[in-house]
Image: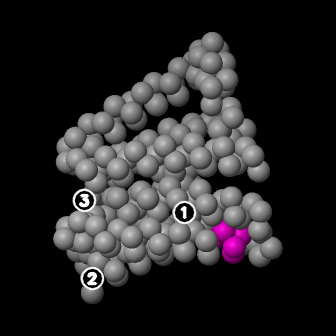
Amino acid sequence: MKQLIRRKLFRMLALFYPFIYFNYTQEQTIYVSAVIAVVAMVIESARFYSHRAEAVAEKIFSPVGKGEEVERISGITYMTLGALFCVIFFPRFIAVPVLLCAIFGDAISSIVGAKYNYVKLFRSKSLEGTLVCFAICIIMNLLLLRTALVSQGLTLSLALIISLTTTLFDILPLPIDDNLSTPLATGFVAQLLIYFPG
């Protein structure tokens, strides 16, 4: 449990992305996000090709990483890519709530699901964690409805769609890491429903 809490607290660093996008232009946010993603990919590549780099990375990130990530691309790198693509593909009023839901929904639901998992679903997910994920997403988006994002296009129906879609994609057994697949899939669904509402 302590390892899980440390990992999810570390994940909160990703709040940097919606904060930057909320306060700066899309172009500026893309530039900063791209730099971070490139650095993450360089570190990721180095640890696969250099034993020394692997040892250093393991020493730094082992307290907040998963054991299985030693042999594959880490969730941290997928997270930087997911945030970058969200900023590239989606306008601010979609990307900011999507990223906030992905960050808070996953983190809090994982901790709750690990402690209270009486009703199991699949992919090691629990009903309790799933309900908490949806509740957190709703709360986050209701708060965003009191910001300037409303004048840019965020509506109550869109907030509900993003909350529900984030929750569904979080439990679906998608073949791609959920740090990348969940925000992207949620964003695309939200964008499609805007352009094709009927």
**Residue at image x 24%, y 59%?**
91
On-image quarter of the C terminus = bottom left
- Residue 185 appears in the rendering: no
For label 3, the SS is: loop
Please name the predominant secondary structure of the magenta segment in the image.
helix
| Number of residues whose C-alpha sits closer than 10 Å to that of mark 2, classed few (under 14), some (14–19) or many (20 or more) | few
Residue 197: numbered disc: 2
Name the residue beneath numbered marker 3. Answer: 91
Between the C-alphas of marks 1 and 3, the distance is 21 Å
- Residue 4 appears in the rendering: yes
The figure's colour scheme reads one colour
For label 2, the SS is: loop
For label 1, the SS is: helix
Closest to the camera, between mark 2 and mark 3, is 3
Q: Is 159 displayed left or right of 106 in the figure?
A: left
Query: Mark 1 or mark 3: which comes first in sequence?
Result: 3
Q: Is 45 displayed left or right of 64 in the figure?
A: left
Do the residues under discs 1 and 3 have CB atoms within 8 angstroms? no
Residue farthest bottom in this picture: 198
Which of the 4 quarters of the picture holds residue 132? bottom right
**Residue at image x 34%, y 80%?**
156
**Residue at image x 77%, y 76%?**
119
Do the residues under discs 1 and 2 have CB atoms within 8 angstroms? no
Do the residues under discs 2 and 3 have CB atoms within 8 angstroms? no
Residue 105: numbered disc: 1
Q: Measured from the top left, where is residue 106 in percent x and y? A: 57, 59
Q: Amino acid at mark 2?
A: Pro
